Amino acid sequence: MIKINAKGLILGRMSTYVAKSLLKGEDIIIVNAEAAIVTGKRELVIKEYFDRRSKGKIRKGPYYPRTPDQILKQTVRGMIPYQKAHGREAYDRLRVYIGIPRSMVNEKFETGAVASSEGVVEYVDLGEISRTLGAHF
């Protein structure tokens, strides 16, 4: 079982690592989903997520999540073959939490080697994106 603290990790890089590990058969737990970062200029990143979210209002679907844990799960889901049986089984082994659950407070988590954000100048927290989309967590 792999336990990852998403605080300060780049969303895309972390998601590719998680997707590969899930397909290998690992169980993965991700905590602090709201602290993962998306690189880029704040206005452009928020506009992109807002445009994705508003597509479902004009026509039926695709529906896009608002909360940071669901956005992170959706990102990982896009990187695995979800329509096939082994992809769905892999996706079922993923658990994502906002914050750190009380039962896991004293446990150790992976951080830096997965998707370090060293040298990144412009970024937006996933929690800030979620609040802009209207999530309450």
Image: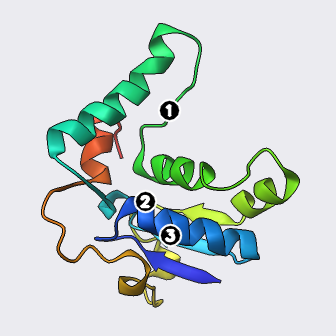
Question: Depth check: 101 or 77 in front?
Answer: 77
Q: Which mark is residue 30?
A: 3
Q: Which mark is residue 54?
A: none
Mark-to-mark CA distance, 3 and 2: 14 Å
Q: Is residue 134 visible?
A: no
* N-term-proximal mark, 3 vs 2: 2
Disc 3 packing (10 Å; few <14; some 14–19; many ≥20): many
- Name the secondary structure under disc 3: strand
Contact flag, marks 1 and 3 (Cβ < 8 Å): no
Residue with the mark numbered 2: 12
Choose top left, top right, bottom left or bottom right for residue 123: bottom left
Question: Depth check: 7 or 13 in front?
Answer: 13
- Amino acid type at mark 3: Ile
Question: Position of 38 compared to 15: left or right?
Answer: left
Q: Which mark is residue 64?
A: 1
- Residue 68 placement (x, y as % from top left): 41, 50
- Amino acid type at mark 2: Gly
Which of labels 1 and 2 is toward the front? 2
* N-term-proximal mark, 1 vs 3: 3
Please name the residue shown 35% across and 25% down the image.
Answer: 51
Placement of 66 over or under 127, stated as above or below: above
Placement of 106 over or under 83, stated as above or below: below
- Name the secondary structure under disc 1: loop
- Amino acid type at mark 1: Tyr
